[in-house]
Amino acid sequence: MFKRISIFLIPLIFAASAGVLPAQTVPELEERLRNATSKDEQWGLAFNLAKNLLTIDQAKAAAYAEQALQLAREIDSKQKEADAAGVAADIAVRSGRFKDAISLYARAYDNGVAAGASDIVQQSVEKLKELNAKQGNYKAAFEWSERQAAL
């Protein structure tokens, strides 16, 4: 019995591990970004660096998020701009820059709508509703709540 299970289990384990790439460190990603030639590749690396540094170094994460936003505009990708704006907004919240975060979540929302990315739209509306309420702007929070109900 054990022999039959192991015959099926061993190839399954190898197949699963073959698709897994080792985690890359921030210095490795930064090196890859310096050597990247295409704007798509640069965007992906800057975006991943921003996400990886989100909890470690907000200033550095914000710089990479801004780079990802700029590259998304150059590539003219609403989806990438929505994703980068969402991460930049998360960084702004962690840094206590709530007005910047509201602006960035609104940008993520607008680009998410343009790209048809319902997940980023929903996340942005939720964050905009929450942040506006925390800032005492209950009218804006209510308006975002209405938009959320219409989704």
Image: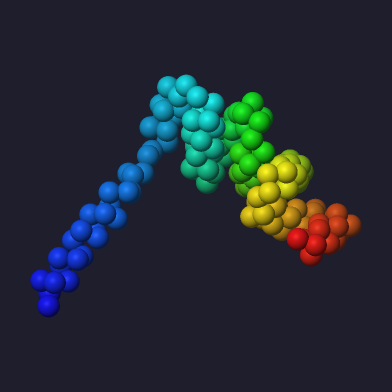
Instruction: Decide if residue 126 is on the left or right side of residue 6.
Output: right
Numbered label tally: 0
Image: 96 above or below 125: above
Image quadrant for the C terminus? bottom right
Of residues 92 and 141, which is closer to you in this image? Answer: 141
Identify the residue shown where x is 42% and y is 22%.
35
Q: Quadrant of the N terminus?
A: bottom left
Horizontal side of 66 relative to 4 (left or right) equals: right
- Can residue 96 be seen in the rendering of this structure? no
Instruction: In the rendered view, tell whether residue 113 sits above or below residue 30.
Output: below
In which quadrant of the rendered view does residue 7 lie?
Answer: bottom left
Residue 66 locus on image (x, y percent): 63, 32
Q: Is residue 25 left or right of residue 132?
A: left
Say which quarter of the image contains residue 145. bottom right
User: Which residue is painted at 59% across and 33% down in the image?
Assistant: 68
Instruction: Determine if residue 102 is in view.
Output: yes
